[in-house]
Image (cartoon, rainbow, N blue to C red):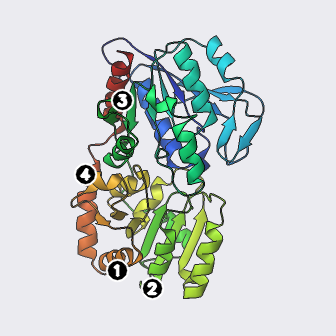
Amino acid sequence: MPVPGPQLRIAFVVPAYWPAEAFGGPVWVVRALARELVTRGHSVDVWTTTLERAGHGRRRTRRDTVDGATVTYLGTPLRYRWMGFTPTLGNELARAPRPDVAHIFGFRDPIGFAASRWLVRHDVPYVFEALGMFRPKLRKQTLKRLLDATVLAALPRRAKVVIAASEVERREYLAAGIEAERIAVRPNGVPAVPSRRSNVLRERLGLTDEPLVLYVGRVAEGKGLSFLVQALGRLTDAHVAIIGPDEGHGTVRRLGDLADGLGVSARLHVLGQWPTQPLEVYADADVFALPSAHENFGMAAAEAAAAGVAVVVTDRCGVAELLAPDGAAVIPYDADALADALDRLLQDAGARHALGERGAERVAAYDWGGVAELQETLYRRAIG
């Protein structure tokens, strides 16, 4: 609902936006936040690329209205994976109504870097949210560190507020030298999720009451998916379903080869990207697993908890803080620890039920309306 006080014109700058579901959870997070801010009476203008999947974009700019927000998909003539170059951004911003505040999502993206320079030149305050991309991870870490210390150093430094989705991400900012007083922890909101079995997923897999472990997220390195496949060797009769876009670095092939070698291929189901946000499938699982090496939050685990499903998550995921101490099985990033936790829960229906109930209670307070209200206070703080 609209709130007292001056309404704001807010500019979102994000490397990809709906319907770019292949970008993963951040697309749903940013869209939900925009929707709730519009509901609270603010104007939201989203500036993004035309990328809908890695490396695929359009040259022409187009505009649309999504959930009440005006979205400008800027022509993206040059692109590499999820990096899109939008040469008309400055001209488009100059012609648009001046924002009161801007919110830059993501890090090491040409659009965010270009927008930050334009905003500084025109004295528009902005907040910065790295979406888990701040600390160099996985590929090309040396190059990323060099860019972070030189070309990109000004982007977080000039932000009025630096937003972390969890204490995990806050510690990453602190380790990089960002002052504690400029960092604010604003968790993600958790949508309402059906808690009754839809059987949509089980019917697709040809399963009835067989034990089912679910993972939802990008199929990529660092997600601990090889641990899940290894666990199948110890989980008699259990199946693992993996739902999410393939990042394209050979992870699907490697998982298949591992499953073949362990003799568990018939019980591993890599389903790719779901046609919609897969909220209806969580309750079909007995256990949800997020065995990642690093997640600034881990939205899928929170959604599974909201459905009342027992969650296993590593202590490297920000969402573990939200669910701890008794709303999830929090484990180290380790294959044996994952297999042990899954085996224990799949053999004990009472423990699964109790863990699912407590997890649902934990996430119930994190509705998007309250999160948007907190975000609004951070915008007003940035304005001054």
Residue 2 shows in this picture: no
The residue carrying mark 2 is: 237
Image depth: mark 1 or mark 2 in front: 1
Q: Earlier in the sequence, mark 4 or mark 1?
A: 1
Q: Which residue is mark 4?
A: 362
Q: Earlier in the sequence, mark 3 or mark 4?
A: 4
Q: Can you identify the residue that label 1 sits on? A: 343
Left or right: 76 as drawn, with respect to 379: right
For disc 4, the neighbor class at 10 Å (few under 14, some 14 to 19, many from 20) is: many
Residue type highlighted by circle 2: Asp
Label 1, label 3: how far apart the Cα atoms are: 40 Å
User: Does the CB distance between marks 3 and 4 fall below 8 Å?
Assistant: no
Give the alpha-carbon distance from disc 3 to disc 4, as whole Å.
Answer: 20 Å
39 shown above or below 79: above
The numbered mark, 1 or 2, whose residue comes first in the sequence reads: 2
Q: Position of residue 119 (x, y in %)?
A: 54, 19
Mark 1 residue type: Asp
User: In which quadrant is the N terminus drawn?
Assistant: top left
Q: Please, what is the three-letter code of the amino acid marked with disc 3?
A: Gln
Q: Residue at x 29, y 49 (%)?
A: 363
Please name the residue that numbered disc 3 is placed on: 375
Task: In the rendered structure, find residue 157 and report the number of the disc placed on it.
Answer: none
Q: Quadrant of the C terminus?
A: top left
Q: Residue at x 52, y 18 (%)?
A: 120
Instruction: Give the image location of residue 365, x and y in percent.
Output: 26, 43
Q: CA distance from mark 2 to mark 3?
A: 45 Å
Give the SS element for disc 3. Answer: helix
